[in-house]
Image: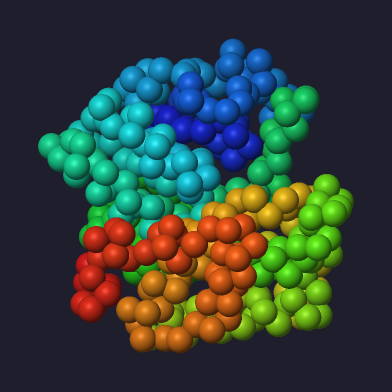
Amino acid sequence: MLMKVSIVGAGNGGIVAAADLTSRGHEVTLYHSLQALKDPHADIMQGKVHYRGEPLYLHKFTQDPLDAVSGAEVIMTCLPTHILSQMFEELIPYLEDGQMVFINGASAMNSVVLSNILEEKRPEVDILIGESMSLTYAARYDYEQNDADVILKSRHNLFSAYPSSDTERMMDKLTVLYDTLVPAQNIIETALNNGNPESHPAPSILNTGYIDNHGDTFYLYRDGVTHHTVKVIEAIDKERQKVCEVLGFEVLDKSARSERSTYFEPDKPLKEQYNESPVLKDLVGPVTLNNRYIVEDVGYGLVLWKSIAEAAAVETPAIDSIIHLTSLMLEVDFTREGLTLDKMGLDKMRDLNLQV
């Protein structure tokens, strides 16, 4: 079954997704906001991209939100969490009954956030919203050459709609696009299986001196995860696992989860899995602390995990310490500014699973 898909966000992930789905016969429109800080490659704006070295033509590139949304069966966002709400508001006036919004990226319970915005702006429109635990691809895009490639398709990628009662309906369509999606119990489970909050902030903050002085030569996965910094990652992961246990979700450590998704090679210690991952080890950065590895993965990752942990009565000293250090270094009160259950309208005094 071929589908009409609109992809929101012409960054690396969005371009690679557009190229991949087009190569598989789907009708893909790529939308790039006029408010974006940077235009994509000139050829992209003409609907042309090289995919694995071969020229490929998308159905359409547009910067008109009406044009982007009209007639689409699936609207897929490939955006950083911190700008997702802003981009969604551009599309809200043009959404049509029966459409699906698939948040393809690092899960942070964004489905609740977008649903709340939709309820405020257009409560009459009937759409489905859901999210995966991580981007469906390890994507590589060369801007100069306008060449896109899929390095890896994430396996066992947990997915949930909000509310979770809509998950099966969304999966019926989305698995046509991505057969690696697996239903989660709810979006709290997808958020707790986002691999970024445990992987990025701690080793970044603990390598601040090097990043401040030599950030453009810093490789987080290869050099930032050491015999000492991996202990902090493991401590954060143990706290996350305890929250999963209390809430009745599957409990797997970082190694097992990343082996299953095929980002890590099996039968190695966690440090070596980070250092030697064929997909991750050659990714440069973060080059500065004011980077999504820190800002997004603390504000929308660790702060959210802490909020969920409080509702589950689980103490999180390791998570708390990284939030505190990051707040001091960047002079941002992430505990106050970050995403919490309260801000989403969820009640920490009631059973969370019954609310999503």
Q: Left or right: where does residue 76 sit relative to residue 322?
A: left
Color style of the picture: rainbow
* 41 relative to 291, above or below: above
Taking the view exactly as shown, the residue that stands out farthest to the left is 124
At which x and y percent is residue 167?
Answer: 30, 57
**Is residue 167 or residue 296 the one in the foreground?**
296
Percent x, y for residue 162?
Answer: 29, 56
Q: Specify the farthest residue to the top.
A: 46
Q: In this view, does 326 lie to the left or right of 62?
A: right
Q: In which quarter of the image is the C terminus?
A: bottom left
Name the foreground residue: 121 vs 159: 121
Q: Is residue 84 above or below residue 208?
A: above
Q: Position of residue 13 (x, y in %)?
A: 59, 40
Residue 102 in view of the camera: yes
Question: Image quadrant for the N terminus?
Answer: top left
Q: Is residue 108 left or right of residue 321?
A: left
**Rendered view: 143 above or below 232:** above
Tell me which residue sits at (38%, 22%) in the image: 65
- Residue 154 makes an appearance in the image: no
Q: Give the residue at x 23% y 30%.
A: 96
Question: Is 50 in front, or is 289?
Answer: 289
In the image, what residue occupies the spot 77% across and 66% down?
A: 207
Q: Where is residue 126 in the image (x, y as percent from the top left)?
A: 18, 40
Q: How many labels does the image show?
A: 0
* Quadrant of the image occupied by residue 353: bottom left
Residue that appears at 41% across and 18% down: 64
